[in-house]
Amino acid sequence: MAKLPDMTKHRGFPSGMPGTGYQFTIRRANPKGVTPIKALPRKARRGSPEYLVDAAFLHALWHYFGAEPFERGNLDAGRLNYLLGREVVPADDDFDPTSYDTMLQIDESVARTSMPEAFHDVMEV
C-alpha cells in the first residue's frame, strides 16, 4: 500500500453538516495525490440550502481558527473551493493549492459582509 501524504487533522473540527451529505473534513489523505483547491464561483443564493452549508462551514472555521492563519490539513477541498479567494484567502506568498500544508486565513471584512450569520455565537441551520 502506498504511503499517504502527511496531513494535519484538525481534531474537534466538525466533520460535516448534520443531517446532510455535506462534509467539512476528510478522513485521510488522498492516495492519488492532494486534491487541488481553487476558487469556484458560488451560485448559491442567500437562504438556499447550499448557501447555509457554506455559511456553516465558515462559522466552523471562524470558531475553530478565528482570525489566525491555519493549515489546510484535512479540510474538505470542495467546501474550501466555494470560499477561496473571497472569505478565505492564502495566508502567505507560499500558497500551494496542492499541499495539505498550505496556510489559509479568513478575510474577516469580506466574510462578515458576505456571510454575517457565520460570526454569531450560535448559527441556526
Image: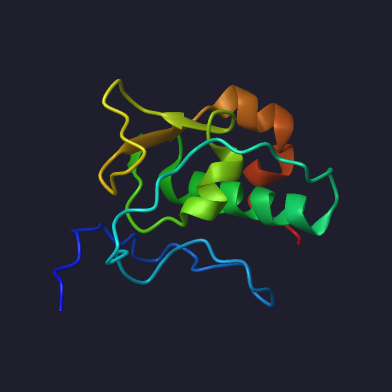
Q: Position of residue 36 (x, y in %)?
A: 40, 46
Q: In the rendered view, would you say 13 is above or below 90?
A: below
Image point (72%, 37%), residue name: 116
Q: What quarter of the picture does the N terminus occupy?
A: bottom left
> Would residue 85 be seen by someone viewing this image from the given angle?
yes
Label count reads 0
Question: With 56 as the anchor, is 52 left or right in this view?
Answer: right
Height in image: 68 above or below 1? above
Question: Left of 35 or right of it: where is 94?
Answer: left
**Most foreground residue, 74 or 81:** 81
Question: What residue sits 54% from the left and 29% below the top?
Answer: 85
Relative to 57, 70 lies left or right = left
Question: Whole-percent x and y of residue 121?
Answer: 63, 50
x and y, in percent, of residue 59 in the image: 59, 49
What is the quadrant of residue 67 in the picture? Answer: top left
Residue 122 visible, this angle:
no
Q: Nearer the viewer, residue 91 or 41?
A: 41
Which image quarter: residue 103? Answer: top left
What's the colour scheme? Answer: rainbow
- Quarter residue 112 falls in: top right
Residue at x 75% of width, y 55% of height:
50
Q: Quadrant of the C terminus?
A: bottom right
